[in-house]
Image: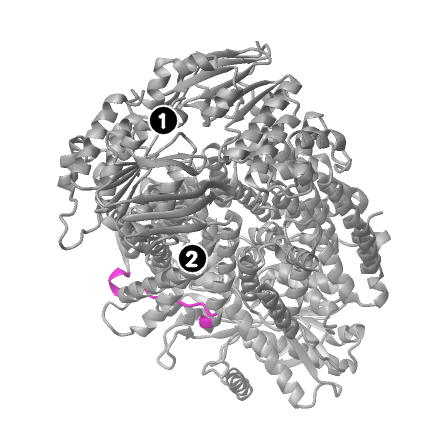
Amino acid sequence: MRKLLVFVITCMVIMAFSLPAMGAKKIVVGFPMYLSGGGAVFGKPSAEGAKMLVKEVNDAGGVLGRKIELLVRDCKSSPDEATRVAKEMILKDNIDFLVGGLTSSQGLALSDVSKHEKIVYIAPIPKVAKMCEKPRLHSYVFRSACNSKTEGRSAAVLAAKHPWKRIATVGPDYSYGWSVTGAFIPWLKNIKPEVEIVHQAWPKLGESDYTPFISVILASKPDAVFSTLWGGHFITFAKQARDYGFFEKVGFVSAGEAGCMEAIRGAGDDMPLGIISNAYDTFWHPDTAWHRDWVGRVNKFMGTKYASSWAGTGYDAMKFLTEAIKKAGTTDTDKVIKALEGLTIDCSVGKLTMRAKDHQAVRGMYWGPVTKVPEYPFPILKPVRYIPADELMD
Amino acid sequence: MILQVDNLAKSFDGFIAVAGVSFQIEKGELCSIIGPNGAGKTTVFNIITGHLSMDKGRVVFNGMDISRLPAHKICRLGLGRSFQRINIFSRLTVFENIQAAVLTHRGKSLSFFTSVQPLFQEETEEILVSVGLQDHRDAVSGPLAYGFQKQLELGIALASNPKMLLLDEPTAGMSRQETKGTIELIGKIVREKGLTLLFTEHDMSVVFSISERIMVLHQGQLIASGPPDEVRTNQDVQKIYIGESRCS
Amino acid sequence: MSRQNWILIAILVLMGLIPVTGSRYYVFLLTDILIFGLFALSLNLLLGYTGLVSFGHAAYFGIGCYACGLLIKKAGLSFGIAFAATGFFGAAAALIIGFFCVRLTRIYFALLTLAFSQIVWAIVFKWNSLTGGDTGIYDINFPKFLDSRTKYFYFTLAVVSISVLILRKIVNSPFGRILMTIRDNPERTEFIGINVKLFQLLAFIISGFFSAISGGLFAVFNHSIFPDFCYWPVSAEVLIMTILGGMYSFFGPLVGAAVLLYLRMEVTSYTVYWPFILGTILILLLFFFPGGIVGFIENQIKRWRSSK
Amino acid sequence: MLLEVEDIHTAYGLIRVLFGISIKVDQGQVVTLLGRNGVGKTTTLRSIMGLTPPQSGSIKWMGSEIRGLPPYRISQMGIGFVPEDRKIFSDLTVWENLDVAIKSAGPDEPGWTMDRVFELFPALEMLRNRRGGYLSGGEQQMLTIARTLMGNPKLLLLDEPSEGLAPVIIQQLADQISKLKQEGMTMLLSEQNSEFSLGLSDGIYILEKGEVRFEGSVEEFMKDEETCRAYLYI
Amino acid sequence: MSFDLSFVVLQLLNGLTNAMFIFLIASGLSIIFGVLGVLNFAHGSLYMLGAYATYQCVSLFVDSPGQFWWAVIAASVAVALLGGIIERLLLRRLYHQEELNQLLLTYALVLVLGDLARFIWGVDQLSVSRPAVLRGAVEILGQYFPKYNVFILFLGPCVAFLFWFFMLRTRWGRMVRAAALDRETLGALGVNVDRLFTVVFMIGSWFGALGGALVAPVITIRPGMDVEIIINAFIVVVIGGLGSFWGTFLGALIVGPVYALGILVFPRLSMIFIYVIMVVVLMTRPWGLLGRPLQR
């Protein structure tokens, strides 16, 4: 009898969970995001940014008179989870549009889903260049994020300004690491043919012990190291590299938003100062009225003191979408695609344009050396500059 | 001669369990091995049936050297056995237990797509009847009463249609009445089918009532062998079992 | 025909009617359930019928995925040929791996299957030029004759039904009976004249074959495949499906797959704490419903019958 | 009465072994359970110790019921168990084997110490740093008894102490046990070897098939030729 | 690139440092298996909780001297207590069941504890700084080697030695060894084996948590670190021998340097190499290099 009772209660709990979700006439947007595991630190603010845009739009009466509903789902770290979650949302929740994904492989996976399901997909974070290149490019995929090419190339532009000749690279052994490094090296060699790549280290994704790699890199005696380690991977690397005198011995250029506030605060005292790194956004720059306004809104929405540099990713992607719907005057997929192509919007970093030819926003990044400043309790990128992507895209 | 054991030896981690045991058993004989705990009876059984490898010696069954054969091959040559502890297929029914052994014996174990249900019904039933389990045909064997499980164990051993049976304490743990019944049953089956029997047993009344020949094992060595009366009066055996008795 | 078979046919017909409702979602969900149900059933041939705890079954599912995907995308074979070959890749891998694994017992068996599956995963992950590394193989399209989700559902239903039929035939065959004797008591089985290791290996191969079939079905259903399908949490998940449904009943794993996938789909709509809920379900299961869902229901029926 | 066992039934899983055994042991007595292998001697002792708890019946220790208590509680109450197959901790040295079993004695009892145990079994003192697994059978048997003594039991359950030992060693062991008896130790012995046990015992129980077939003093037993013949001789 | 001797030595030291970390973590796994017979999937979770708790304690003890050390002690003890609760409430009830059920229970714990950590500490990357005395590096053969790694290199063997000493020279240790050999007999000798098991599980949990606490300053504390470590710990324990303490030490000493030096030779196949070692050990000597065949 007791067993029966337990069973009934379990069933009731389950049923309580599965009360049907009501969705009348709303424009439903699915937002699968990396919300559990190591990348969640970026996925979460990105989702918050998307929610903020939705709130702003809905408060202003919605789009085409319809409210927007945002369904945020956890898709962990893996592309297969992203695929599954996206399909579930498409088929079960009847989403009209798909935005989301964090890792490169998730971007590619979601792009593939959008192609098969014939639904518009905007990638807010995934950067892998080949997503928007032949043969993988198709009409349903868009990217508001910067791409691995612009990221690698802008790093090359900066690296070329230093007198470094011997360069080593370190990156996680998977598609993001390969594609950014693959963009960095030829671009740098293009600008500065005398550069020599002395070593390439490929620790596995999620490596917890970088020390063997650190020693090997040092043994190759580079002038500088280019890294594509991101998030916790970078922090772990930095913590372990520091005591080898790593950052004193070699210059360090880090892609992968090692300079974003989340990473810098995550690293705490162990953040190496002086390394050149990038971020999607910085809350202190540019110090203009519209940017201050944006930062203020994010702070208020997320209830924090310092706006996350990742909120913009979700925000911008959703803004592209809503503006396109507005422009198209309908939610019809083909028309929204047409509207997205060439669309220019105002967003967290100013104006961005979605190129018609490869469906990518011409988006740059903030770069600068990590520096301690008196104004904030953590280091920031200073002097920081926005490297636009216009010349780096093709 | 159906079974010939030559100079069998086995030790575990330096402990000598069997120290050079040799004996022969004629076809149709009813033999038993007795001896105190740890004398090596079960070890001898396990070596003969291929469960354990031997350090030294040779076992010939029905004219064939089986010293190095794996257990399943020895079984297929016609040497069936039962175990001291209950060793049945506890999630299967009584019928299925025996049927599994029958169909293996009949070489059907590797057929993948014929339905097992109707196979060898009669033959299995026959064995069920002969071990007195026909009333429990469809009972799951795990929860069955102990005595029945022991009978089932015997049934499984018989189902391979062996030429010779090795029974390791077939009545261990049974009450007096059960023991008597079981022993009579074994005797009957063995004589009817003309099998050769070798068994170990603690209950001396059983041993002496059924055996034609008794072998006594002590500390891994065979110290006596012969018909019951001879063994009963053997000095060495007396000594092992009751010491120099004060009651005469 | 027995009553049980009539019920099964009724269920089959009902499932066949699902697309008529017009719900894309149920067609999708059901296809998913059928595929993972077959995967769980094939695992259960080892677990529930042979008594071997494989903790690395994701390997054969993954091999199925990649065999099918690679044969279509890289070798340019037609779907029919690629899919037909898929099972044999799984069986071949199971033959090689199983050959070593069946020598071990219990926890060592589980650990060795785990270790092998991790090797398969690492190879798939690292062999970028062939497998596409972490980004996997994408754009595996439905074949021409199955160019819609509904058609693919019917195809899946057919393949899974046939596989289930075969598996059911096998567990009800003399061979299946011997597997059960091995599960209950490998030692005794040896002494009714069975080469236990050989039978365990055969079960391993059959299980690998059908796991790979389910993987092949999944590759096309999902259109893209990733190394994570060979990763150990997938092995754990399919084990949970099997236990949840009940490993001692033939259809238990299928029921487990259905319940787990349905629950996951519902729960993840409301919370990101799905692992917590899954863990709690598992703990409740272990302490209160050791026979799984089907085992529990069977017990209730038995009790109800005996009380009548 | 120190120990009163009343009609216990015990099974290992599904295998029933004891069919209603009743035994009494008085302070200072040595009582022997005689019988061949498999009659339930070991199970009786294990039942008393709580290692295989009986399904029914009662076990009273100094008047209080102990059936159903965990073995360690029963041991702490003053019953010491010397298992049949010795169960030495093979990786531990002799000294360590003794050490893990130490329990302090009551305030007004002499209590067993390492020295006192070595006095009783001088052979062990020489071997104090040898691993249990490397001892001979006789040495292991001594160690098992010594180890149990370290817990200061009021009653010693000895399960077939003479099993598998050479005659000389058995003699030695008998001496040591009778020394224990002289010191007032109460013992419940299980034996196949009647020669070994009869000399030591005050009372005798003969078991067969999980039931008591005979109970009485050694003298009564000796006189009862029929029982002697039936249960001891082959 | 030339691999001169000093470089190879440095690489070896790197591998050894990692070996000591893995050893600290895996030894707990090994002890629990050796005595309780349970292969604890949730060991990685205890390691993760150790790291999180250290982070929490560091921020609690802020500004007090020896902040890091107190945090390590407090965190590992807290997790050990949690381990005790888990053993008491859940694990104990499954000792007599099939291994599969124990395995699944500990896997369920992985899921539950992982989400619990996410619920409490969120998804942020958390970081703990090294204590001031252990910042910087020492010079070995002209190469820099972090002080913290030196500390770990010393601590690993010290902990191993202390534990060995505890097992050999204390009564509790002897009882634990006896319980691993024969729990029933030990119970019959008056030892409360149930309580002993709880304590052993706590000790095992403490080792896992200590590993997490000590590794906290050199990694990022984040969700998912539990699953990342557990397979590595399994590998080490299996190679050395399930349940063998010194086996675990040996296993770690093999895996750490092989991995580090393997990077020099097959930069991207080092991990596969480790799995292959595991497979080979299981195939040829399933009970591991220093273990003994399972008897239970």
Q: Which residue does the image show at 52% across and 31% down from the upper left?
A: B171
Whether E186 is among the magenta residues is no
Q: Is residue D150 visible?
A: yes
Q: Amino acid at mark 1?
A: Cys
Residues at marks 2 and 1, CA–CA distance in whole angstroms: 97 Å
Mark 1 secondary-structure assignment: helix
In the rendering, at what x and y percent does residue C56 appear?
57, 46
Residue C213: where, in percent of width, then height? 72, 46
Residue D144 image point, x, y percent: 27, 37
User: Type of residue at label 2?
Assistant: Ala
* Main secondary-structure element of the magenta-colored stretch: loop
Residue indicated by mark 2: A224
Dot 1: chain letter: D
Q: Residues within 10 Å of mark 1 (few under 14, many from 20)?
A: some
In the rendered image, residue E125 lying in the magenta stretch gets the answer yes
Q: Secondary structure beneath disc 2? A: strand
- Whether tag 2 and tag 1 are in contact, CB under 8 A, the answer is no
User: Is E236 or B4 nearer to us in this picture?
Assistant: B4
Magenta range = E120-135
Relative to C293, is D170 on the left or the right? Answer: left
The residue to which callout 1 is attached is D228
